[in-house]
Image (spheres, rainbow, N blue to C red):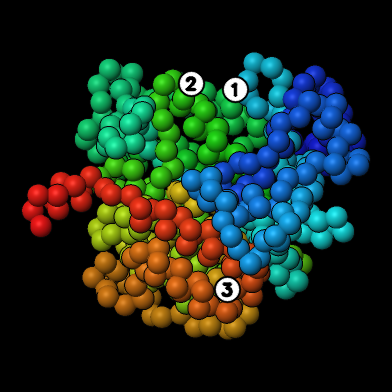
Amino acid sequence: MGMGSGKVHNTEDLIKWLKDRKITEVECMVSDMAGIARGKILPTRKFISSMTDRSLKLPESIFGQTVTGDFIDSTVLSDIEPDIILDPDPHTVRLVPWYSEPTAQIICDTSYRDHSRVPIAPRNVLKKVLDLYTAQGWKPVVAPEIEFYFSAKNIDPDYPLEPPIGTSGRKETARQSYGIDAVNEFDPIFEDMYDYCEAMDIDIDTLIHESGAAQVEINFNHGNPLDIADQAFIFKRTMRQAALKHGVYATFMAKPYEGEPGSAMHIHQSIVSMETGDNLFAMKNGKDSKLFLSYIAGLQKYLPAAMPLIAPNVNSYRRIVKDLAAPINTHWGHENRTVGLRIPESKRVDRRVENRVPGADCNPYLALASTLACGYLGMTHGLVPTNEMKGNAYESKRYALPRHILDALYNLRASSDLKETLGPDFVQIYLDVKATEHDAYQQVISAWEREHLLLNV
């Protein structure tokens, strides 16, 4: 890694890092269920002393907070609202490049007094799944591609979004898949984004204009799932800040614009042997291995139950529609972009599956935890996938994904295998959070209802 966090391995390194950069404040962050950064901001002196006496705390109920900021009732949460301890992970320290004062941000793990992990914290859910892989001698490697849209500032939420004005002074209207000049419309924002990412060691690979008006995709280099989830978590915040500096919104909503394609977080994934370093998804002769096919079968079987974790909001399901660049089922195929599980053309060393189902609005920790959990169950249960889809998967009625959050929640509630793999307490509180969010959504009357029902029914 570069100038950011690569040299920081322990508390001593961390204190030196903060002093060398004359850091005055430290933002201590944890991801809540929605992937929103929660936490505390401390003067550096206080932050350093909190690490030795474990005095940095937050109420456990932040994991029972909805995307609207409301707190829920859940049998998983204690009535007395105990504090949990934040344990800063030295590897994750980074500068916050958009402040004028030297400020650091650090991602924290969460534990109880006895040092045991808080099982309902999203970062710990991913760690739990990675521990299952380690026990088998397997090391997952992932590379996400995150799509997002720019929009002009939207002060009134009742008003539809509009594409922003780029450097040409005109709004983007035509679809500009892979257009170079179309990306250049937003060059000043991307220059800031690249500067920010470099200052923070966020390892992004390429930038592509996607098919929607003012839609962009960022590809991450492949790596360890925990590092990648940390980077994606910080990247979303970074991208929003870079855009705001130019008076524009960057949004990771799954479907922000009517009539435009949604935004996905495609996840490329492969498994290597911890012992030999070989990619376990391909055989010596280059053919797909049996383990690879079982991994795909696990995704096929369990993705409908994992949907609340990779399509977590009501809006997420507006993306999962026919012929708008998003999958509607769990078919798999080589070089087939209509399926949910695409096998890109690759050499043996790069053999991987691309899970095209997750939306850009998902929590990166939970998206990676759930897709790896599905594959893990497939491999450990020796599952066998369906026949490969050679044609257009949109024409198939089989292996459909849920089309609504309530169906998805029902699937997750019924899947004892996924509950066990991700942690029963975590799944229970996640279901409680999502049910509460849906109840709040049901209170809202939309413009469509006023337009079509007000005077007609």
Callout 2: few (<14), some (14-19), or many (20+) C-alpha neighbours within 10 Å? few
Quick check: 282 left or right of 60?
Answer: left
Callout 3: few (<14), some (14-19), or many (20+) C-alpha neighbours within 10 Å? many
| Residue to which mark 3 is pinned | 418
Choose between 407 and 400: the one closer to the eye.
407
Q: Residue at x 63, y 67 (%)?
A: 75
Which of the 4 image quarters holds residue 269?
bottom right
Choose between 173 and 405: the one closer to the eye.
405
Q: Amino acid at mark 2?
A: Lys
Q: Amino acid at mark 1?
A: Trp
Q: Residue furthest left?
A: 456
Quick check: 210 left or right of 91?
Answer: left
Q: Position of residue 34 (x, y in %)?
A: 54, 50
C-alpha gap between disc 2 and disc 1: 9 Å
| Residue to which mark 1 is pinned | 98
Choose between 140 and 423: the one closer to the eye.
423
Q: Which secondary structure, mark 3?
A: helix
| Residue to which mark 2 is pinned | 245
C-alpha gap between disc 1 and disc 3: 40 Å
Asked if the residue at tag 1 contacts the one at tag 2, i.e. Cβ–Cβ closer than 8 Å, the answer is yes
Q: Position of residue 101 (x, y in %)?
A: 69, 17
Q: Residue at x 87, y 59 (%)?
A: 114
Q: Position of residue 303 (x, y in %)?
A: 47, 69
Which of the 4 image quarters holds residue 410?
bottom left
Q: Which secondary structure, mark 2?
A: loop
Asked if the residue at tag 3 contacts the one at tag 2, i.e. Cβ–Cβ closer than 8 Å, the answer is no
Q: Amino acid at mark 3?
A: Leu
| Marked residue nearer the N-terminal end (2 or 3) | 2
Q: Residue furthest front?
A: 80
